[in-house]
Amino acid sequence: MKNKHVFSALLIVFSMSTSILDAQDLIMGFPEEETDAQITLEAKFDALLNADNLNSWMKYLTAQPHHVGSPYDKKVVDFVAAKFKEWGYQVRIEKFDVLFPTPKLRLVEMLAPTTYKASLTEPPVKGDPYSDQTKEALPGYNAFSVDGDVTADLVFVNYGIPEDYVELERRGISVEGKIVIAKYAGSWRGIKPKLAAEKGAIGCLIYSDPEDDGYYRGDVYPKGPFKNEYGIQRGSVMDMPMAPGDPLTPGYGATDDAVRIDIKEANTLTKIPVLPISYHDALPLLTALEGPVVPNSWKGALPITYHIGPGPAKVHLKLEFNWELKPAYDVIATMKGSTLPDEWVIRGNHHDAWVHGANDPISGLVALMEEARVVGDLVKQGHQPKRTMMYCAWGAEEQGLLGSTEWVETHAKELKEKVVAYINTDGTGAGFLNAGGSHTLEMFFDEISKSVMDPVMNVSVFERRNALEKVKNNTSWAHYKLGALGSGSDYSPFFQHLGIASFNMGFGGESSGGEYHTMYDSYQHYKRFKDPNFQYGVTLAKVAGRTSLRLANAHILPFEFTHFTSVVKKYANEVINLAGSLREDANRHNMLINNGTYALASNPKNNLKVPEKKASVPYFNFAPLDNALIILTAQSDNFTKTVNNRSLSYHSRRNLNTILRNMERALTREHGLPKRPWYKHHIYAPGFYTGYGVKTLPGVREAIEQSEFEQVQAQIDILASVINKFSSKIKEAISLFE
Amino acid sequence: MKNKHVFSALLIVFSMSTSILDAQDLIMGFPEEETDAQITLEAKFDALLNADNLNSWMKYLTAQPHHVGSPYDKKVVDFVAAKFKEWGYQVRIEKFDVLFPTPKLRLVEMLAPTTYKASLTEPPVKGDPYSDQTKEALPGYNAFSVDGDVTADLVFVNYGIPEDYVELERRGISVEGKIVIAKYAGSWRGIKPKLAAEKGAIGCLIYSDPEDDGYYRGDVYPKGPFKNEYGIQRGSVMDMPMAPGDPLTPGYGATDDAVRIDIKEANTLTKIPVLPISYHDALPLLTALEGPVVPNSWKGALPITYHIGPGPAKVHLKLEFNWELKPAYDVIATMKGSTLPDEWVIRGNHHDAWVHGANDPISGLVALMEEARVVGDLVKQGHQPKRTMMYCAWGAEEQGLLGSTEWVETHAKELKEKVVAYINTDGTGAGFLNAGGSHTLEMFFDEISKSVMDPVMNVSVFERRNALEKVKNNTSWAHYKLGALGSGSDYSPFFQHLGIASFNMGFGGESSGGEYHTMYDSYQHYKRFKDPNFQYGVTLAKVAGRTSLRLANAHILPFEFTHFTSVVKKYANEVINLAGSLREDANRHNMLINNGTYALASNPKNNLKVPEKKASVPYFNFAPLDNALIILTAQSDNFTKTVNNRSLSYHSRRNLNTILRNMERALTREHGLPKRPWYKHHIYAPGFYTGYGVKTLPGVREAIEQSEFEQVQAQIDILASVINKFSSKIKEAISLFE
């Protein structure tokens, strides 16, 4: 078959900077003769979505706390599984027994200069009956903190990120043998105890400063959505940038018969005890600190002068946990593909919560369920997808993506063979579409963002998002710009471990609050402050539903490489410029120290030490990367021309789809990233010292950022070879055309 | 006499971008044969300075509150006058009877939704006996607030500056008939009631948010230097950007026989009652406000969610003042010049305080006194200055530069004829030299800044200041960059009203605090937190002393025009670019409104109105200004070449000095600025809506900023004619050379 028309949509995308598809008569991956059917299908899909379902399911699913291992989590699992079955899916529940520590003893007390015992509790609030269920709920704690019993002077370390320790050093303050207290924002929480331990601290408290999500932001719960003085953010502090998943089965599934390592060998637990506290409990401790006043950028919104310490506040922190295996249940619902059953499109959202989890994760899960229900309806009407569609509800996400990671590790071989893409959601709210993902699918997603209407304004979700760019950033998007994915939800094992093209998406910007991982992320809270009528939930179902359905039915998988190439080039420029600007910074910094200017500019009363000199940044040979990008550009352009001008046999089309399905895999390398082999993707990774925050071209970028200059050249060469491998795959795809 | 060498110092300055004077063998305005004598004189001057004097005088002068009209202010005046006499000066005390309202009744109470009566008092603090003298002190109030008795709902207006009212408008909130509460920072205080009244408010409270000078900045008094919860910033709210000075004698001296206008005709009093309060008193009021949460940039450091209102907080504000005339005493000490007695160099600092005023103004006054003492000593040793030197201690500065303004207005004719320059100081601290002034003297001042050593670091005060530029701003100064003078101290009548070249200088950056205009600006506070050993006070005496002595003894007055020209060109570019960027902003802003993008980008839940459209900015003819700058450049360059290459007779030198002395006057225009004829300088003025903050090229700049576009062209033409007048004066100076 001639496929000239198949790529006419692609052609438009490639040849115009904006892809306004009139009346959506062409969509990527669909030949003209299949386009109408797909558009009709999507219209039916939209029409069947019902916001009432999202509402009633959320009410049921958040009726009680349902963390991994809790009785209600099993009810949630059974409910979701039963629904999937009811809608016509083959459903299996896969169980993984994962390490899950729960608190046995939590004690924080100040012994000097005055005494204070932290309450560590979140009292019920008026008007929210869910907040009464304290007995069923896990109290505030950080999962995978080690046990500990430490007493020491306290040091305030701001966010506890690397640059904060530079400031401490300038003041001659060490955290060696001390307990640190850090604000919750500024980095993923697990970075704080990790870095504190590296610096010699023996304990770590993390508190929610009201500046970040409390009264400074807006009215607090229950009057408003923000964190009240007692709110405690739970959360995992596992060393996820090293690897997520069950710490006792690193790199393989935590199945019944899996060999579990000794807990002492588990390298993703913290090195020191760590506990989150409310600002009610933090205030007496911070008030008691003396020593230097903090730098301006460290100041929060508590009504005190923030001091660094150390001491005289002396703190006793004692933590004991039940180190038990708990069952993480993954609900896997499969709708077999009609013609391509061995090509899978996977859609996932976790079901476990820290407490009730109305926002995180149920708001995303109910959208996924509604998508699945409607797909089931459509199948009953005869619209079976070509490819297999799978809907997954993951367990034990909150502790470190345990359910999804164990499942992915267990089925790695099959997934690498079969999966076309993974589409993730998690908590979602109202406002603007935020989506990240593989840039080989950016133009595909652009069409979707332009075809779904905002539920409040009479424009597409793309136009709404673009209005924000125009007003806030004085720029304008020609196409939807996918963010780069770091970590923080269940796409990580698919995307960064296996190299499966992935998305993560949700709505936000008009639903801020301080409920995240607290006792107050309840149905009441969601209904009052997030997406009261679930109109954005339904819109998310439309976006994610189209994403899944188009991938499931596409004639040719809608990957393209020209935009991907320009994104990678942008990252490469960033990295090259980073080396240059760090070199200049270091030179200037060292010159200011050498010629005494730093000393002259500082206030002698402050006893600030002149900062440490920085390592000089050598020049690197970026030529291999530049040359790889030249080849990538040529191959991408060639691919675009080819699909537009040349034809393809049926057999070749199958082969082309196979190659396209595997393209993201070409961006991985079995060795993985330096120091963290679990992460195999070489374009995107969570930052080693940022946690969730993404680092693109991570091997090169982090070697430069972390002053590991002797590693940089090898990482440039590795990155170039990965890109060259990717280019050769494009070449292979091109060779299939006649 | 050939004067080839006279300008060799000037030559160096003109021909090199940095003027490093080896061993200071050449100084501007002094021929080679007089340079040694001047340098020897300055060395003697330095050697005679004694920090102990500053200490003991401060102790005496701040022993009791000494506001205008108080018994202790008279003691201060008599003490200072006696000292000047003792040091060999002719001294006269000039008295002006000025309007000075003092509080009879101050009441702030909240009537709903709860009740609260503001304490309005600053209690004594432990360890500072001066804070006990509440009986002798004026309580917290704003001078020149009108009497009033108003009750209304409260509206929080952030700083109460124009852009804040734009935000209120977007929220559909009017202050019409309301009482506003504004934070103290962000503008000069008088702007707040002025603008509030323009917008229809009937009362105004101003409070000190802890973010600006309270616990957010550092430890509060008495533990640290910042404002404790009870601190109240007093201060004048007279409409000083309109005109400073006694409101009843506008434009002329408040002498015994002066005709005083009726108070009802006085146009610089506020239109509505206004009172400053502490954050202790503001907290209950702000806590009671409801309505929209404030924009992010409005948030302060109180432990609340800031709301705008209006209400439900309902406030009763009642103010009554004693509207009396009080004597403002100026101490004028004259040291007659030996050869040029009719050329005056005036040095001034005020003596009156809001309470004890250790920092403001006594820290500056004691430096001035020590300069005067040493000049007196030097005269006794035979070093009489060539020109007359006058040391002035002004009264009633705090209420609106009353003492200096009345004196200047009284003696305007003589001052315009005789004064070479006015050198002002006021409160001073420790750290870095901050100086503003006439840019015709910038290169002269540069040499001084490079010749005085920092008292702590082994470099010049210039190098120290430059280190800050290098470290903070990644730039480097070739020469000392004078700031442009706005208002806020006694230079205004000299500089902006008469057009006398002026300086204002002091040290700061290492002596921050929250004591300004409170009960706690005491000797104790100063000794602990500002300049404990008065080493920077002595350094200020060196800088200001050299400035005065060099001007008094210069062979040729050290004005130059090349740097002045480049500064004015910079301002002109700013103004031209301002028109361009406002035009672009308005177009973009209006487009975003017209095409609905603004509406799309906003959160419908917030009920934010789409902003008002902005007036389109027409194109202006800047050619007259550009042409004037071409002529100015040519004349300035020509002057530089001329003084370097051509000679001057004795008689011509006298004439040249007369022309140079009058140069700044050429930048004024008798008509003054639009809406405020008292301000006659056309290069520098305090901002009509910023207060102290300077506006350069104010006629043009403010017409553009305030969207009075129909005024812009006339103002460009006026500015061009002023610059042309200045250029013709330079030409006249050049013509004196042979």
Image (tube, coloured by chain):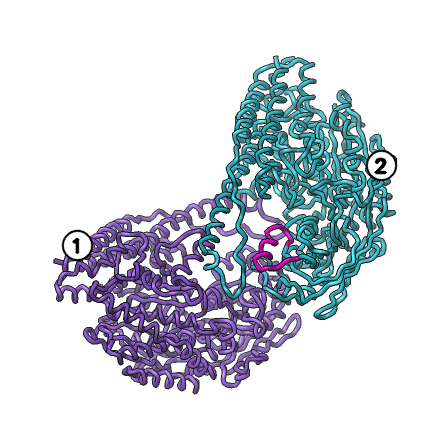
Chain colours: A purple, B cyan
Amino acid marked by disc 1? Asn
Within-10-Å neighbours for mark 1: few <14, some 14–19, many 20+: some
| Residue plotted at (34% across, 57% down) | A697
- Give me the chain letter of mark 2: B
* Viewport quadrant of the N terminus of chain B: top right
* Viewport quadrant of the C terminus of chain B: top right
Q: Position of residue A283 (x, y in %)?
A: 61, 69
Are labels 1 and 2 assigned to the same chain?
no
Q: Picture quarter containing residue A150?
A: bottom right
Query: In this picture, which residue range is highlighted in magenta?
Result: B159-175
Please tell me whether mark 2 sits on a helix, a strand or a loop: loop
Q: Position of residue B430 (x, y in %)?
A: 67, 46
Q: Is residue B230 left or right of residue A211?
A: right
Identify whether B412 is placed above or below B111. Answer: above
Give whichever of B507, B538 is nearer the camera: B507
The residue under label 2 is: B259
Give whichever of A270, A417 is nearer the camera: A417
Q: Is residue B694 left or right of residue A241?
A: right
Give whichever of B570, B202 is nearer the camera: B202
Amino acid marked by disc 2? Val
The residue under label 1 is: A645
- Give me the chain letter of mark 1: A
Using the rendered image of the protein, determine whether residue B498 is visible from the camera's viewpoint.
Answer: yes
Q: Is residue A502 left or right of residue A67?
A: left
Using the rendered image of the protein, determine whether residue A685 is visible from the camera's viewpoint.
Answer: no
Q: Is residue B577 left or right of residue B172?
A: left
